[in-house]
Every structure is written in C-alpha cells, then in structure tokens.
Image: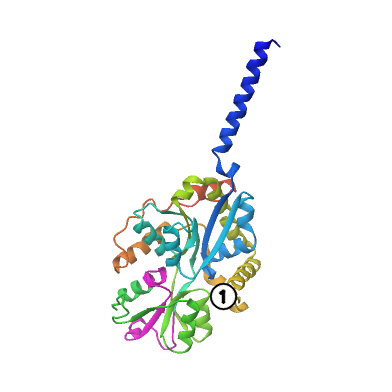
Amino acid sequence: MSRHRFIAAALAAVAAAALVGCSHSNNPTASAPVSLRLGYLTRITHASALVGITDGLFTKQLGPNVNLTTQPFSQGTEEVTALLSGQLDAAYVGPNPAFNAWQKSNGTAIRIISGAASGGTSLVVKPGITSAQDLRGKTVADPALGGTHDVSLRDWLARNGLHTNTQGGGDVSIKPTTPESAIVQQFVSNQIAGAVNSVPFDVQMIKAGGVRLWSDPNTITVLVVRQDFLAAHPDVVAGLLRAQVEANDMIAHDRAHAAQSANAALAKTLGKGLDPDVLTASFEETTFTNDPGMDSLRDEVNKAVAIGLLKPLDINGLVDNGPLNAVLAASGKPQVAT
C-alpha cells in the first residue's frame, strides 16, 4: 500500500470511529443510565404493577441500563400531582385522574400508553338498600373527590334523580375518605350506608355483610407516561410496555401465582397482605387487559363533564396506542384499536 493510500485509510478509520462514537453519545440508553420513576396504587386493580414489581418483570424488560424506582400511592389524585410536578415519569392511575392531568396541562403533560384493568369496582351498601332512592338522606363514601369512583357514583345517583354537591350536601352525602381501608371500617361501624370502591375493599365490605348494588365495568386502571419522557426514551417506554404485557399474561395464565405475587407486594408496602378468600374474589371480579378501551374512556369523560367535575374535554391525542401495538405485534399478539 502506498503512503498516500495508507494515510487515506487511516483517516477513514478515524472518521468511522468518530461517527460510531457520535451515534452512541446521541443514544442516552447506550452511554448513560436512564432513571424511570413509576407510580402505582396499592390495590388489586393495579395488579399488573404489583406482579411486575414482585416478579422482576419491569427490571428484566427494562434492562440493566435503566434505574427503576417504584413508588406506591394511596390516591390517583396524588399521582397526578407527582406527574405534573415532574416527580414521576410514568404511573398506573385511574382514568379520571388522567383526564385531569390532560386538562390541567392543556394536553402537554401525559399520554395514556396502555390499559391495565377494567371492572373490579362496585357500590356496596347495607342490607335492605335495594335502590338509589333508599340512599336519600344517607352518607356514601368513595376514595377521593373527582376520582374515577367519585364520578361513577355521582353519575349513577344523578341518573336516578338524586342531587349531590362537592361539599357533601344534596340528596345523598358523598364522603371522600382516605385511606380506603378506613371506608371498610366506617361501613362496619355504621358511619356510612355504603361506598363505591375497588377490589379488595368492596370485597371486604361484602364479607362484612354488605350487598353489591351495582358494578362498574369501565376501564379502572391505565398506564400513563410523561410526554417528554416518551419523546426522549421511546426504547425505555417499550421495555415498560413489554413488562406490562408480560404481567397481564402472567395473570391470565397463572392466576394463582400472580395473586400471590400481588399479595406479596401489598404485604411489603402495607405491612399486611389480603386474606386468601378476599384475594381470590378480588382477582375474579377484575378484568386485566392491555386495551385502554376508548369507548369506555369517552363514556367516563362524558360522565365527569355532565356532573360538573370536569370542564368539556377533547381527549383526542390523549391515548397513544402506537408503542403498545408495536410491542404486541412483536410478540404475535392482537393489536388494540386506536
């Protein structure tokens, strides 16, 4: 090789190495660890998160270059505050808190990227109460003003001709109560006539002598991510979704194991797990699905607007099923409707 050709080849090699170096420096997951802060609620309707944490599915699918921190919450409204203030990157949350985050940020803060669960929510009342009219003048509890349960309860009462207001007045007094375990205690001590709650708490109320008056089949849990995080780390979000899908597969194909994993997560966080019969009934009552359910979400938005807990809201753009469908397609699973 001539001297000129040797120099040219050397320069080409240096240039190629520089290009490789640049490509790595532009890929944060290749050059530096990424932190992912994930929120969830300590209830069985968030079993996808509970199973994913206990069985290490998130850690496995995200890989060694993602530093995962999981944080339990007692209310979805608290998760929204954390999302909007930049303290969380992603969260399992109820639809109405997600709507509130979307509205408060003028559509700039979050995206719903997957469903997690539907159903698992009921109005449980004292024996002898058989209709909405039997609740007139009585007090009924739910976890939080403006939450998914609160909207369902107020909508149902309104459709049955009963007026409520956010101050606890009206034909039926609605009492936001936290923690949710306190709702069960108030029901047992006859401080309330009933409550709208999700598993396991509605199951515990039935076990304490309550009667299920109606059940809500709508979407109860979705997975959301901050838009800036999705834009910066689409590969990390894909890993998060792979873990979500794997967790729901686990629930579908080995429910007994999944239930024990979820219970272990609750015991670690709350200091005590669920009784076996409550745990089993809670899983039976809930449908675990990756589909966020657009029809259900639109229905829930309309309810919240109709009862005055949400300003008129267009949720077009809130749900982004693209990353989820890519994950589903890669594993040979049916895609969800967009």
Q: Is residue 143 magenta?
A: yes
- The N terminus, quarter of image: top right
Mark 1 falls on what kind of element?
helix
Q: Which residue is mark 1?
A: 281
Residue 220 vertical position relative to residue 169 in the rendered view, above or below: above
Residue 123 at what x, y percent from top left? 43, 77
Mark yes or no: residue 276 visible. Answer: yes
Nearer the observer, 271 or 139: 271
Residue 235 at what x, y percent from top left? 55, 46
Nearer the observer, 164 or 79: 79
Q: Is residue 199 magenta?
A: no
Residue 208 vertical position relative to residue 160 in the rendered view, above or below: below
Is 199 on the left or on the right of 150, as rendered? right
Residue at 45% from the left image edge and 56% from the top image edge: 86
Mark yes or no: residue 328 visible. Answer: no
* Highlighted magenta segment, given as a residue range: 124-152
> Crowding near pointer 1: few (<14 within 10 Å), some, many (20+)?
some
Q: Quadrant of residue 16?
A: top right
Residue reaching furthest to the right? 1
Amino acid type shown at disc 1: Ala
Residue 32 vertical position relative to residue 155 in the rendered view, above or below: above
Residue at 45% from the left image edge and 64% from the top image edge: 94
Residue 179 at what x, y percent from top left? 48, 76
Q: Quadrant of residue 67?
A: bottom right
Is 184 on the left or on the right of 1, as rendered? left
- Please give the count of numbered marks on the rendered protein: 1
Nearer the observer, 309 or 72: 72
